[in-house]
Image (spheres, rainbow, N blue to C red):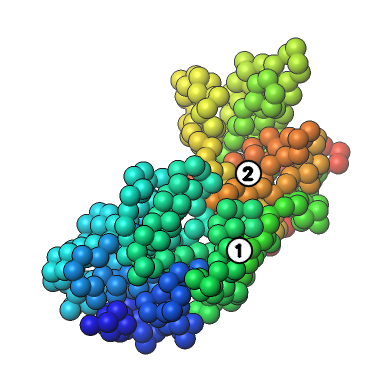
Amino acid sequence: MLPRDVLATLKLEHDVLWIKAAYPWQRDDALAVLEGERPYGYFTRSRGCSKTVDLSAVTLSFLLAADGRFRAYWLASDAEQAALAIDTITGFVQRTPALRDHVQVLARRVIVPESGAQLEILPADAAGAWGLTPHLVVADELANWPATTGARRLWEAASSAVAKRSDARLCVLTTPSSPDHWSFKVLQAARASSLWRVSERVGPSPWMSEDRLAEQKARLPPSVYEQLFEGRWVRSEGSFLEPSEVDAAFILDGPANLPADMPDVHGPWVAALDLGVVKDRTVVSIGHVEGEVVVLDRMEVWSPSPDHPVDLGEVEAFILSAHREFRFRRLLADPWQSLDMCQRLRAQGLEVAEYTFTVASKQRLAATLLSSLRAGNLALYEAEGLREELLALRLVQGSAGQWSFDHKSSGHDDMAVSLSLMAVGLLEEFSGPPAGFVVPRSGISRRAYSSSEFG
């Protein structure tokens, strides 16, 4: 049996054969890996273009058609991607009755007992890849691997090992990222080599709906959207926010001033603390959500000087005072510098939720801020320096494709972080206030507003 014969039996969901559902370019890529004249392949596709599914189908086809001892290695960007590969292979086995008694799927290994053929799945941080003698190496999402020494060494060990066998094959299938990522140099070398087949598919997945693409385009930075959904190698740089979108958010005349006779219940407010002591500023933001609109009600900033760090006692006193005024339901804070303060605030009866800053959580903050602004769902007042800070934010992208915002070397992003953290807490934790809810804003140049003003 040839690998292409196995490929013709594999089933997708709803009892549909992969070979029948696949587009011509999917079949061409699969057959090029299975039996093409060129032993190495570098394929790029946009997000949603069936990369993991197609790699799974090809790899299973090799395993089941192999005679005798066959060793394949699947290189994944991380443990999560490795688990996705196993899940996808398991799905093919379970949906294809002829395979169920012939394939054994373990946590990180797939075995065909009759022939002894095996697939081992290695995340990019795995060790011990030197010494392999593979028949097949597949690299999943290479352009989104981390720029770590471990990840590079895994690639170098596995990709160089295919030279040990004259019949070994190598396949890279990835969504493009930045041309600064080391995988782009691999692509450039592949383009110039007669041993490599290079196929770079540009454009969105043909089965992705226009409304879903529009939603992604609305909430992603343009360069990130081009990488993920247009399948282009694009360097992420420039301003994070559009000036017109920032300006459109400043529709409030001032901070909220709540009357003393507000009902003595927890209101629809959430507070967020971004704590700095010596170099960075400390910012507390308090707001609520009306419908889909995140409303900033109060922002307080403490700036340190070389001789006078931020007085944490003053910050803590403000939070307690603001809690008595707004009765916010939760305070979100990064526990790294504020752990002691959070413990004291909890002892005073406040609900404090810890929001640890990681690469993923920073992207979550950035995505929330960007999408809220673009949708017109952010209502701000002229807190001193807030507009200027938002306009000065820069888009940054990590080597593994993650993106967020940052400040210039001489600037700050503390107000933006606190604002974004407040928005995340509001949009993901709580529903909005009752219909007709109005927060008063007193003062000569301040006006009250209601949810009806935001459509």
Left or right of residue 82, residue 213 in this image: right
Mark 1 or 2: the one toward you:
1
Left or right of residue 164, residue 222 in this image: right
Locate the C terminus by quadrant: bottom right
Query: Residue 1: x percent and y percent?
Result: 23, 82
Q: Nearer the viewer, residue 214 or 154?
A: 154
Q: Amino acid at mark 2?
A: Ser
Count of marks, rendered view = 2
Residue hosting label 2: 420
Residue 113 visible in image: yes
Q: In the figure, residue 311 lies in which quadrant? A: top right
Q: Is the residue 435 above or below the residue 24 in the image?
A: above
Q: Amino acid at mark 1?
A: Gln
Q: In the figure, residue 310 lies in which quadrant? A: top right
Label number found at residue 188? 1
Left or right of residue 16, residue 307 in this image: right
Q: Nearer the viewer, residue 240 or 190?
A: 190
Query: Residue 86: x percent and y percent?
Result: 30, 61
Please tell me which of labels 1 and 2 falls first in the chain.
1
Q: Is the residue 246 above or below the residue 117 in the image?
A: above
Task: Give the residue displayed 74% in from the left and 24% down from the top.
Answer: 303
Task: Give the residue displayed 62% in from the left and 32% down from the top.
Answer: 274
